[in-house]
Image: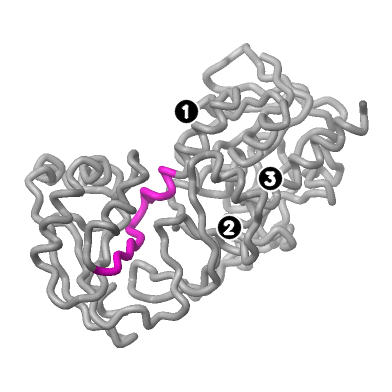
Amino acid sequence: MRFDTVIIGGGLAGLTAGISLQQAGKSCAIVSTGQNALHFFSGTFESLEEAPDRMAALFEEAGIRLHYRKGVRLMPMGSFKPAALALEDVEIFPDPHFSRKALIVSIEGYQDFFSAFLAEGLEQQGTQCRIHLLDLPEMEPLMQSPSEMRSVQIARTMDRVWEKAVREIRLVLKDEDTVILPQVFGLQDTAVPDRIRESLPAHVVFVGTLPPSVPGIRTQQLLKRRYEALGGTYLSGDEVLQAHVHEGTVHSVVTRNLGNHYLEAEHFLLASGSYFSKGLKSNPFRVYEPIFGLDVRQADERSAWYDPDFMADQPYMLYGVETDEALRPRAEGLPFQNLYAIGSILGGTRPEFGTGAGLAVRSAFAAVDRILNAKTESE
């Protein structure tokens, strides 16, 4: 199976690159193991302090609306974090004093939204809080098993019964100027958050829950849908096991599901993520990249991998594959000719691209431009 580019990893970096290349007329295949960091996405784009037109256009074409405003966002534990660029249903406030009185609404039996901690944090900012639990009969089948009362399962139900939830909230709402809800709305019907805002006589704020993230999964689904609509091939639930490399050039990769049917391409993008998605692995002696055996920047001594203070920034989170200026990763000090590393597998090795979602998007665009410019120059 031959493509212009094979992308290893179907998260934010991989999908951004895949959509961009397909738009440029290049055939792509994305190999995705399944769950990725987008399923833990908070809804804001870290380290993107400017309003990036290129990214906004790509997201808008995928049906994902963004908004930009420098300020703070409300975190699940009632604290506030600086933010600027976010999904439309994630609100950014000028400062933490956004409400006089707030009604915090959760769902009976839902353990992944910490209403009491949220209320305590807001009260420290001067907001009076009251908590209400929605008791919806439609949730009873999910309550039979604690594993079913998770954000995604709840969201599938809430897309059907959100109007019933709104009616109950209207009945219990007193003089609160703000209603705070968990982000379990709009998984499949992206219009639901807006409809809830329009239906309640108070300011509505959606706050994150424990993963998986409903806004993150929705974002991944919409980006994937856009990529496939452009003609891209998406191999879900598959995994790249090894690569065929000769003199620094990758010729093909082997996947678990395709067996002897190799994926061949002119260019390859490694967007396999960090430790969570196994783009990086470790043993007691080293951190390593499992597919190509790439050089990984890391401390030699294991004791330097971590800080004993659990709440401190952990050094190992900055470890990543070594690349040259063109984002081509190295093995034994030598860069590959047609392989590019993007996203969180870079760790902190390329600080100019930022961190988190900013790193994913900026590095994806940079690698895409390298590929397209290389093709133009060769012609």
Estimate how packed mark 2 is, as few (under 14), some (14 to 19) or many (20 or more) residues with alpha carbons within 10 Å.
Answer: some
Q: Amino acid at mark 2?
A: Gly
Please tell me which residue lies in front, 291 or 111: 111
The dot on residue 356 is 2
Q: Position of residue 38 (x, y in %)?
A: 48, 47
Question: Which residue is pictured at 50% across the width and 59% down the height?
Answer: 86
Q: Amino acid at mark 3?
A: Ala
Residue stretch rendered in magenta on the structure:
202-218
Estimate how packed mark 3 is, as few (under 14), some (14 to 19) or many (20 or more) residues with alpha carbons within 10 Å.
Answer: many
Q: CA distance from mark 1 to mark 3?
A: 22 Å
Q: Position of residue 31 (x, y in %)?
A: 57, 29
Please tell me which residue lies in front, 168 or 320: 168
Q: Would you say 140 lies left or right of 264 here?
A: left
Q: Amino acid at mark 1?
A: Gly
Q: Which residue is mark 3?
A: 364
Looking at the image, tell me whether mark 2 or mark 1 is earlier in sequence order. 1
